[in-house]
Amino acid sequence: MRNEFLPFTKPVVTDNDIQEVVGVLKSGWLTNGPKNAEFEEELCKYTGSKHGVSLASATGCMHVLLKALGIGPGDEVITPSLTWVSTTNLICLSGATPVFADIDRDTMLVTPETIETCITERTKAIIPVHYTGAPVDLDAIQAIADKHGIPIIEDAAHALGTYYKGRHIGQGNSTIYSFHAIKNITCGEGGMIATDDDELLKKIKMYKFHGLGIDAFDRQNKGRSPQAEVIEPGYKYNLTDICAALGLSQLRRIDEINAKRTALAMKYRELLADVDNILPLSDPTGYDFKHAWHLFVVRVDSDKISRDDFMVKLKEKNIGSGIHFRANHLQKYYRENMGFKPGMLPATEWNSDRICSLPLFPAMTEDDVQDVVTAIKEVMANV
Ligand SMILES: *Cc1c(COP(=O)(O)O)cnc(C)c1O
């Protein structure tokens, strides 16, 4: 057994990352400023989007974007139930109704077919998730959205470095990236909206910062225009330059980080191939893609041991793990207030009861992967 606990994830912060942050601390400008501008530009260069706006979290990005798209009471928004609760919460907080599309049982991605069955006259947005860093079938989902004139918001919290048919995901649609501490690159906390839509960009910038219609940092004046006035009430979600400097420094290593994650994921696949009742996700089929490997998820599918007990047993063997995610529609508030019941989303519920994210972070070694699989085999041999 391992002597040292292997956590499910651990951020990698290099000396250079630290120097970049120290540089900001010494610069005399700590809040949203030149480092944010550079971070936005560099991210767009990487993803091929036209505009980027960095915010304090991806949750903040979703809040601002739903507002900028004018989503409110009477509207419906389609998203998978197997996503982080922030999306469902914000749909509800906007006054709109979440409508959950089921997922493919093997890839855990929402499909064009399940999305199409959810569309009504009230549908005002579709929010697919590139779950674990594998892309949804964007062209097919786009065709459905275009047919009905509904905007897509791509949840790319797992998907910086994910490519679909040879291009980075997110091009053309408004797309949300997260830089929370567990994501492929981090600011500590942070997020970014990437969009090609000039009009939407103006609204995003306005709602992001008090409704003033300007950033904290006017790029010409190197300070805030004292004449700015409220155009419409807005929020305050700007990212500090302290955080942006960390994100920017990490962004420069994204391909290296994802290559390391990919190698570890391939090792898991190889070593788990002959382990019964532990089922890794399948790759999507029918299109060419590149995976960002944010998570390595397996399904514990055994009538001898539950997923929860499996996680406890792994922890006893010094292996950490996580659950991404519990189906939203069966959580207390949504069950009790929105009439969601077990049985509504069969593939989502089947997975929600079985999924477990194994340790995956760039500082891990292939020996660590071997330790995890050895521990899994021991747990499963003794049920
Ligand atoms: C992490 C995550 C978010 C939210 O990101 P924050 O930056 O923590 O607000 C949204 N969606 C998914 C799928 C996520 O994993």
Image (cartoon, rainbow, N blue to C red):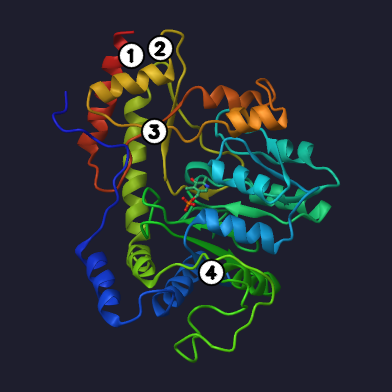
Residue 53's disc number:
4
Q: Quadrant of the image for the C terminus?
A: top left
- Label 2 CA crowd tier, 10 Å (few <14, some 14–19, many 20+): some
| Residue 50 seen in render | yes
Q: Earlier in the sequence, mark 2 or mark 4?
A: 4
- Label 1 CA crowd tier, 10 Å (few <14, some 14–19, many 20+): some
Give the structural element (helix, strand or loop) at label 2.
loop
Between tags 1 and 4, which lies in front? 4
Left or right placement of residue 119 versus residue 178 in this view:
right
Residue 322's disc number:
3
Q: CA distance from mark 2 to mark 3?
A: 17 Å
Q: Are marks 1 and 2 in contact (CB under 8 Å)?
A: yes
Give the structural element (helix, strand or loop) at label 1.
helix
**Residue in the picture at 34% in, 51% down:** 259
Q: Which of the two residues, 380 or 20, is positioned nearer the viewer here?
A: 20
Residue 108's disc number:
none
Image quarter of residue 240: bottom left
**Residue in the picture at 31% in, 28% down:** 271
Q: CA distance from mark 1 to mark 2?
A: 8 Å
Q: Are marks 1 and 4 in contact (CB under 8 Å)?
A: no
Residue 17 position (above or below residue 310): below
Give the structural element (helix, strand or loop) at label 4.
strand
Q: Position of residue 260 (x, y in %)?
A: 31, 49
Between tags 1 and 2, which lies in front? 2
Q: Would you name the residue on which mark 2 appears? A: 305
Q: Quadrant of the image for the N terminus?
A: top left
Residue 349 position (above or below residue 139): above
Q: CA distance from mark 1 to mark 3?
A: 18 Å
Residue 343 position (above or below residue 34): above
Report the amino acid beneath label 3: Gly
